[in-house]
Amino acid sequence: MKTWDRLLRAAFVSVAVGLAWSIRGDYGLSLGVGLAMGLPAAVLAMGFAYVSGQRTMFKWMPLLGAVAAIAFFAPVTDYHPLHAYASNKTFVNYSYGFFMLIVQGGGWVCFSCCLIGLMLEKKPLTASEWASAAATVFVSAFVFYYVVVDLVGFHVTPGPWRTDRVVGVTGGLIGLFVWLILNKKHYGFKAAFIGYIAFGLGMAIGRFLANVRDYSTWTIGDWHVLQGLFGRFENIMEVFVGLAAGFIFTYGMLGRKCPDFPEDKHYKLLSVYSIFFLLAGIPVLHRLVNMSGSIVDRDTGHTKMYKWKDLLERYGYAHPGELAEKIPTLISLVCLLATVSAIVWLVLYLRNKHKFAAFPILCVLGVMVVIQNLDHEYVFYPIRDVSWKQFLFPAMFALMLLYAIFVKTPEVTEPDDVAEHVNWRRWLVGAFIVYALIVVLSGPVNAGRRDEVPPDHMRFPAGGQTPAEWGYRPPAPKGL
């Protein structure tokens, strides 16, 4: 595969995952049905299948997307304190914060990436192998957590809001990597290893760029670095997590000839379920859990319906209350359209219309962009209040659409010994260099922070005090 071709294919997945992670970032992890939060991992798997150009990958696409989405939510951990540490002014705090963001980001999506690789192994895993891998992950997670947290007494984020789940996730991944090596699952190991580095570095790079936007005094004339480009865009971190991670993973994984899709009827039935989950289930779950007018905002204590009415009234609409009450209905209609698109994908899938492989990715992201614009009322904004945030998401989707229309993705493969090989030393050295550059540049960037650093933004405060010794308590949630 030529380098420019590989770069272009990776760029498509990069934009797709960047858009998906940005939408996920708008809703956090508050979904009662967490499977809907697997959108970035589902788009990663589906995008990777599409740009591979292989006809058989069109058959694998639904199952890969669904499995990746489910695995994405499984290890979810609280990373907010780590972003605070990475925004600190002191070297020991921001270097620790960025390192733990790599650990956190990598651990979060590594299971999804590993399952993509394991599903595409030349020899399908047996039931006993799946059970053995799962048992190894759970046992190693428990043992590692017990040793690090209970015996050694190390805490990732000490204080009353402590969360050490990432320790258990890391232990599980250690067991997973050992299992993959011992069982010679080469493609699964490569997917897990590159996925860990891709999303770990993506999280750290995204946080650094957000710090540049918020704290840096670097300017070019009157133009603030990133500020002029993104304006009030609040999701800069989420965008660059997806952009960096989607690109790195796809670039590293492309080129392998994937196995034929099994003819077993159970696989076919699972694919049908997966199609409806990916294209209809994810939007419907968002509608049911996140977009009801009765939902109470934890920060303001107001319902979502109150927020909709208030914004529409300030925009000068004649009947803001009536218009606000129509928003859930409009979102429901979009979900109905998503269900229709799932039926269309099913027809294309059963007829093996490989040339329409981009259709499901464009559908799920297009639907989610429309839903997000309705939920945040971007479609009702007066032209004077339009921000880059409203422009960027449709622009990213338009780039994907242009790629699907005008760029051909023929099948290009490499010998298995080349495609399954991963130069792990080079990847680790490269990851360390990126981390070191982030840490070095964070000194002058974070120094530009003008506000006082609160206690909860310091993992290692002066004098060795802990948050509990400061008497720090996080504010109680409002509206609950």
Image: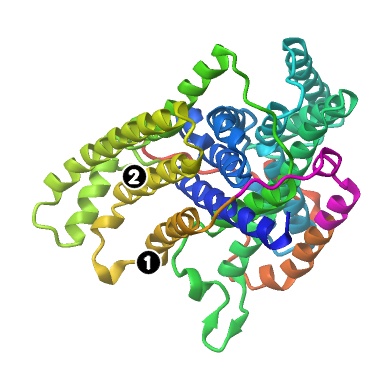
Residue at (72% x, 11% y) in the render: 127
Q: Is residue 55 above or below residue 200?
A: above
477 left or right, relative to 197: left
- Location of residue 450 in the rendering, given as x and y in whole percent from the top left corner: 59, 71
What is the C-alpha distance between the residues marked 1 and 2? 18 Å
Quadrant where the C terminus is found in the figure: top left
Question: Magenta segment: does it hold 413?
Answer: yes
Quadrant in the picture for residue 432: bottom right
What residue would you read off at disc 1? 387
Q: Given the image, on which type of amino acid does mark 2 rest?
A: Ile
Q: 63 and 210: which one is in front?
A: 63
Question: Magenta segment: does it hold 324?
Answer: no
Q: Given the image, on which type of amino acid does mark 1 rest?
A: Ser
- Location of residue 189 in the rendering, given as x and y in whole percent from the top left corner: 80, 34
Quadrant in the picture for residue 209: bottom right
197 left or right, relative to 411: right
Numbered badge on residue 266: none
Give neighbour class at mark 1: few <14, some 14-19, many 20+ (Cα, 10 Å). Answer: some
The residue mark sitting in front, 1 or 2, is: 2
- Location of residue 210 in the rendering, given as x and y in whole percent from the top left corner: 59, 62
What residue would you read off at disc 2? 371
Instruction: Confirm whether residue 39 shows in the render.
Output: yes
User: Of callouts 1 and 2, which one flags the residue occurring earlier in the amino acid sequence?
Assistant: 2
Quadrant where the N terminus is found in the figure: bottom right
Residue most extreme to the top: 128
Residue at (76% x, 44% y) in the render: 194
Magenta-highlighted residues: 410-431
